[in-house]
Amino acid sequence: MGMESWRSKFISLRCFIFLILSFIATHCFLFVQTQALAQVDECSALLQFKESFAINKSASPDPLAYPKVSFWTREGDGNQSNCCSWDGVECDKDSDHVVGLDLRSSCLYGSINSSNTLFRLVHLQRLDLSDNHFNFSQIPSRFGDDLSSLTYLNLSNSLFSGQIPSEISKLSKLSTLDLSFNDQKVDDRIPLKLTNANMRSLVQNLTTIKQLHLSWVDIYSTVPDILVNASSLTSLQLGGCGLNGEFPIGIFHLPNLEVIDVRHNSNLTGYFPNFNRSNALKYLNVAHTNFSGQLPTSLGNLHFLIVFVISSCNFHPNVPSSIGNLTQLSYLDMSSFASDNEISGQIPSWLMKLTQLTTLSLDGNNLQGPIPRSLFQLKNLEYLSLFGNNLSGLVEFDQFSKLKKLKGLDLSNNMLSVEIRNDLSATLPKLQTLALGFCNLTEFPKFLKNQSELTMLDLSDNYIHGPIPKWVSNATRDTLSELYLKNNLLTGFDQYPGVLPWTNLIFLGLGSNMLQGPLPVPPQSIRFYDVQNNEYTGEISPLFCNFNNLQALQLSNNNLSGMLPQCLGNSSVLEILALHNNFFNGYIPPICPSKTSLRIVDFSYNQLQGKIPRGVMNCTRLKVLNFANNQMSDFFPSWLGALPELRILILRSNGFHGVIGKPATKHEFPNLRIIDLSNNGFSGMLPSNYLEIWNSMKYVDENRRTYFEVNSDEVGGKYFSSDYAMTISGKGVELKYQKTPYLLTLIDLSSNRFEGEIPEGPVGKLRGLVLLNLSNNSLTGHIPSSLGDLAALESLDLSQNQLSGRIPSNLAQLTFLAYFNASHNHLSGPIPLGKQFDTFQEDSYEGNSDLCGKSLPKKCEDSESSTRPPPSIVGEDEDSVFQIALDWYVVVPGVVSGLIVGVIVGNIWTTKKHEWFVETFSRRRKPRGTRARRGCRT
Ligand SMILES: *[C@@H]1O[C@H](CO)[C@@H](O)[C@H](O)[C@H]1NC(C)=O
Ligand SMILES: *[C@@H]1O[C@H](CO)[C@@H](O)[C@H](O)[C@H]1NC(C)=O
Ligand SMILES: *[C@@H]1O[C@H](CO)[C@@H](O)[C@H](O)[C@H]1NC(C)=O
Ligand SMILES: *[C@@H]1O[C@H](CO)[C@@H](O)[C@H](O)[C@H]1NC(C)=O
Ligand SMILES: *[C@@H]1O[C@H](CO)[C@@H](O)[C@H](O)[C@H]1NC(C)=O
Ligand SMILES: *[C@@H]1O[C@H](CO)[C@@H](O)[C@H](O)[C@H]1NC(C)=O
């Protein structure tokens, strides 16, 4: 052996190392080259992705939004480009693969489908496309098939729609999935949907999920109970998902869970468990659900709790004082405990221990007594709302100077008297919202002079009199967007009004005052304009045609006159056009010349002429059409039968005439519930073919809501809902409804020239009917006994016809019948006996010389007496029968339809202010101080 072999060995070793090194080098080079090519491919995929969208500012509502992709460019020749430095792009340090793409709020507008180059970025781990406008695209299944490395996926608030593909559950590495707020209801677009089964497999397969956010996705199923095993879960947001069934109580015990948000699931039941001290919850929101039961004392164990919202649930109103132990609590909303469960007593003293509170809402309960002075020790309060309780006593407004951080205050609708010193201005914090409705104010508070940040001011229902002073508007000229002054004694504006001084006004509520002169002209921004019940005169200025945002124009009950501007119905956003009871004359301008958003058109009680504009045919969302008491002249507008949502049609007291023929199809007027054609010149037979097909009158809707309401389209997160006030005649008197009861179903064909018989079959099917008036026609034949089947009937007027024969004895079955009039016919025989019929007086029958009965001058022979109805049907006494009946309000003229302003619920952590607004305004204003009087029978 020797040197030689050593050398050869050395050489071969060198060769070997060399070979190895060169091998590595070549392969590394190849490897690096492959890598570079792959990266070039990813960069061009990104560029093509960019090209597939338009840049559109309005696609991203976030004020900080900017188009990140517009800075993406290919520098030098293609191979050199490195997209890793592009805004929003993140690459892996070693492999250079694109692993993160953050295009949140990037103004992207356009559709995204399965051929999008996004799906070539197979190494993506974090993808945020939230707050863009994907034009109602479906979420492509390739998200699940191709992007299997994803740990973070955020597609919230991006206008995706349709079914969420089941492939999403293949993303087993996900720790964050956010698909919330894809629910913008534009036309007939469907929001995102998730089937029950897909929800289950999501939870089953995403075993490391931490944040599961599906708020406002249509799920409509139960909360899968396997969620109790999702031990990594930190945040569960399922607000507004249509959830039902019982919320699995085990979820509350998940060790890492910090956020539970299941608000706005009205069919979701649930209870709070006994919370133990290790519970990590920071945020708990079950507002507007059917959670019930006792609030456990152990709530005091939730030491980390910052936000606690239990408004509009069904909890027992005993609130444990242990909540006073939650020293971190910053946001507490216990408003609107369900109507039977209102929190009563004084404002609880344990509240004063919650020194971190920034928001406190106790709206809509039954709290009594004064506002305690200790409340003003909550120095961090920013929002305080005590709206709609029974609080009483004097409030020295000075006290609020102690709350230096206060931004929003609502004391409305209590029994409080608010006393405001004139020199208070300097010390008060600058407020953004202030509501002092029903607070016994007699003048505008002087401190408003210094309130230069107010966006909302509500001084409704006070005794503020005289003109609105200039200084009220000076400070708020640019900030104020909502002004509510209804129900005061205001006469006008200090300065000649002409144009309203606020430049950004959106909501204006000046109803029920004594305002005079020409209509004040609002700024361009106006969406809601309500000046009903005032003394305004003059014409509607053509300027009103230029308000492109106007959704509601409510001018009813003024002294306005002249012709209506031609452009009035042109707008594509106008939803409510209420001109009731003025002196408008001339022809009705074209309305709905193309598809529009009109829902309520009320021109009643004016002096309008001519025909119903045929353009109404295009008002496909119309729910109410009221032309009562004008001088119009037209045939029966059978073409209205095609309007799918028309619910209320009132043509009373005009010159409508002719024979009402047959419906063109069996599906005409599918939603009609109220039709009043009375006091016109209609002739021929009663429209039995229509009576036959008015299906919505054939049943009593069990899902009854209290009042008929119209919700406006939501714009920028805000919407309003309006009740509908109307006048009808019923029960022998004129009835003014300040709100239309949801179940009110009526047919009034009285005072026309109808002849022939009452069609027995069709009439008997209208079992939802509450009021039927066929009086003052030329009807002949018998009263059909099928009327006895109309179990909901409260008022039946057949007077002043030529009806003959007996009054069917089974009408006595009608337990709600409170008014019956068959006078001035040719009826004969005994009058029915029994419950309600024992209460009708002689005038119900007069002018029928052959009728007999105990209460009539002519007594019956024994052989004639009618049989009583079976006893099971009667039973309650007359008063209680009437109690169950619908509310009839005979109202002093001048009471306006209500208004609720609401806000679509925003994202929880970022828009607390929104939440505040939601809870402040989206509830029904309690009818306190209302001038309505119940009952009407005499
Ligand atoms: C911008 O997007 C909105 C929808 O958010 C759309 O209505 C509008 O037409 C778009 N504008 C352009 C120029 O594409
Ligand atoms: C949005 O989708 C509609 C079809 O639903 C299409 O006509 C329109 O071109 C799309 N807009 C964009 C910007 O992709
Ligand atoms: C998703 O994006 C939105 C912004 O568009 C943000 O508010 C939200 O917190 C994100 N979700 C998660 C879970 O990070
Ligand atoms: C949760 O996991 C446990 C143990 O793996 C299992 O026994 C139980 O059935 C699971 N619960 C549900 C609701 O799936
Ligand atoms: C919690 O509150 C209750 C009642 O207010 C009190 O008795 C109890 O001592 C408090 N517990 C703690 C740990 O502070
Ligand atoms: C209904 O709308 C269409 C356009 O959408 C229009 O062409 C038509 O004239 C309208 N009909 C009436 C009667 O105004």
Image (cartoon, rainbow, N blue to C red):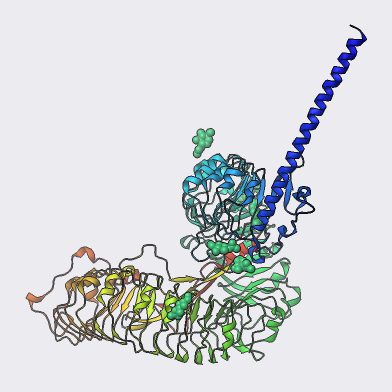
Q: Quadrant of residue 731?
A: bottom left
Residue 588 left/right relative to 10: left
User: Which residue shows up at 23% across the image and 65% down it?
Assistant: 873
Is residue 362 shown to the viewer in this render? Answer: no
Which quadrant would the N terminus be assigned to in this image? top right
Q: Nearer the viewer, residue 690 or 506?
A: 690
Residue 643 left/right relative to 695: right
**Residue 343, relative to residue 521: is it above or below?**
above
Most extreme residue toward the right is 3
How many marks can you see? 0
Most extreme residue toward the left is 863
Which quadrant would the C terminus be assigned to in this image? bottom left
Is residue 675 shown to the viewer in this render? Answer: yes
Q: Quadrant of residue 521?
A: bottom right
Return the x and y of residue 188 as percentages of the image width and height. 48, 64
User: Which residue shows up at 57% across the image and 49% down it?
Assistant: 297
Residue 137 left/right relative to 795: right
Return the x and y of residue 224 as percentages of the image width and height. 49, 44
**Residue 573, relative to residue 603: is it above or below?**
above
Q: Nearer the viewer, residue 229 or 599?
A: 599
Most extreme residue toward the top is 1
**Residue 348, relative to residue 813: is it above or below?**
above
Return the x and y of residue 768 as percentages of the image width and height. 31, 69
Q: Quadrant of residue 751?
A: bottom left
Return the x and y of residue 522 as percentages of the image width and height. 61, 83
